[in-house]
Amino acid sequence: MSENTGGRIAVFDTLRGLTIISMVLFHATYDIAYIYGVSLPWFTTGPFQDIWRCSISWTFLALAGWMTSLSRNNLKRGAVYAAAALLVFVATTVASVDTAVNFGILFCMAGCTFIYTALRPLINRINPVLGVLAALALFALTYGIPRHDYAIEGLAWLGFPSPTFTSGDYYPLLPYLFMYLAGAFGARVFQTYIHEGYPTWMRRDWCPPLSAIGRHSLVIYLAHQPLLIVLFTLLLG
């Protein structure tokens, strides 16, 4: 996550760190409410849970898309996401603490990164402002697709879950590919129309603890849920 000449751009680490903290708090709240049965009506009823979840996942996807312009090797990055997604699937299947994660956000980030890499020559020919607007419009138009059941099997990864499909974390390519692409186009808008390169204030590490969390976001993502389960089992079990 660096430009060829300037090193890391700390503002992205800081934003990712804030989002990781929000994610850990979200999953802790989810575990307390749904696994350990503590009554939290403010979380389990009404729209707050969905809004909180979207604030986390959409930020992760947009940031991952933005990183396409900064990554030295997007194929390698996609492979790391894919390996992590497989690890999460195996771990949640074996543990059986909650519903196993099939086609979760790490799968989505891997798939989006591979698709972007394959289509990059075509994507780079699109005006980035039009690209952002089109990606956001398509995200809105396709947002409801995976919220229905379809009488077909094997297409849950794309966004067409069957009645038998279940997952504890579900982010198919439709509609979330478009949020990823909005981030990728957003990076080009910034560098083309707003600021050539990244200014000093974006490179400065304003909050080292947060940026450190952001730099290790994938490790924290993989480790936090088992640690939460152990903690809550000791405290609430």
Image (cartoon, rainbow, N blue to C red):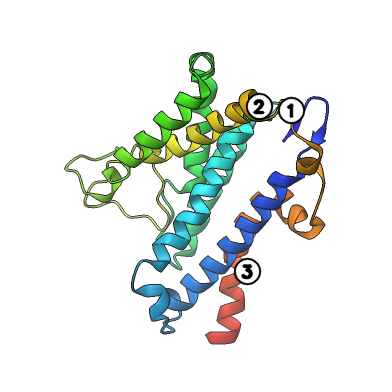
Q: Residue at x 74, y 28 (%)?
A: 197
Circle 1/circle 3 CB separation < 8 Å: no
Which residue occupies the foreground of this view, 119 or 8?
Answer: 8
Foreground mark, 1 or 3, reads 1
Circle 2/circle 1 CB separation < 8 Å: yes
Note whether 162 is above or below 77 in the view shown.
below
How many C-alpha atoms fall within 10 Å of the one at disc 1: few (<14), some, or many (≥20)?
few
On the question of residue 75 being in view, the answer is no
Mark 2 or mark 1: name the one nearer the start of the chain. Answer: 2
Instruction: Provide residue 205's location: percent of width, then percent of height.
Output: 81, 49
- The numbered mark at residue 197 is 1
Q: Amino acid at mark 3?
A: Leu
Which residue occupies the foreground of this view, 97 or 201?
Answer: 201
Q: Residue at x 46, y 26 (%)?
A: 131
Q: How far apart, in angstroms, are the residues tagged by discs 2 and 3?
A: 40 Å
Q: Amino acid at mark 2?
A: Gln
Foreground mark, 2 or 3, reads 2
Q: How far apart, in angstroms, are the residues tagged by discs 1 and 3?
A: 39 Å
Tell me if 66 is positioned left or right of 213 in this view.
left
Q: Which residue is mark 3?
A: 227
Which residue occupies the foreground of this view, 227 or 7?
Answer: 7
Q: Residue at x 66, y 27 (%)?
A: 191
Q: Amino acid at mark 1?
A: Gly
How many C-alpha atoms fall within 10 Å of the one at disc 3: few (<14), some, or many (≥20)?
few
Instruction: Provide residue 174's location: percent of width, then percent of height.
Output: 36, 38
SS category of the residue bearing label 2: helix
SS category of the residue bearing label 1: loop
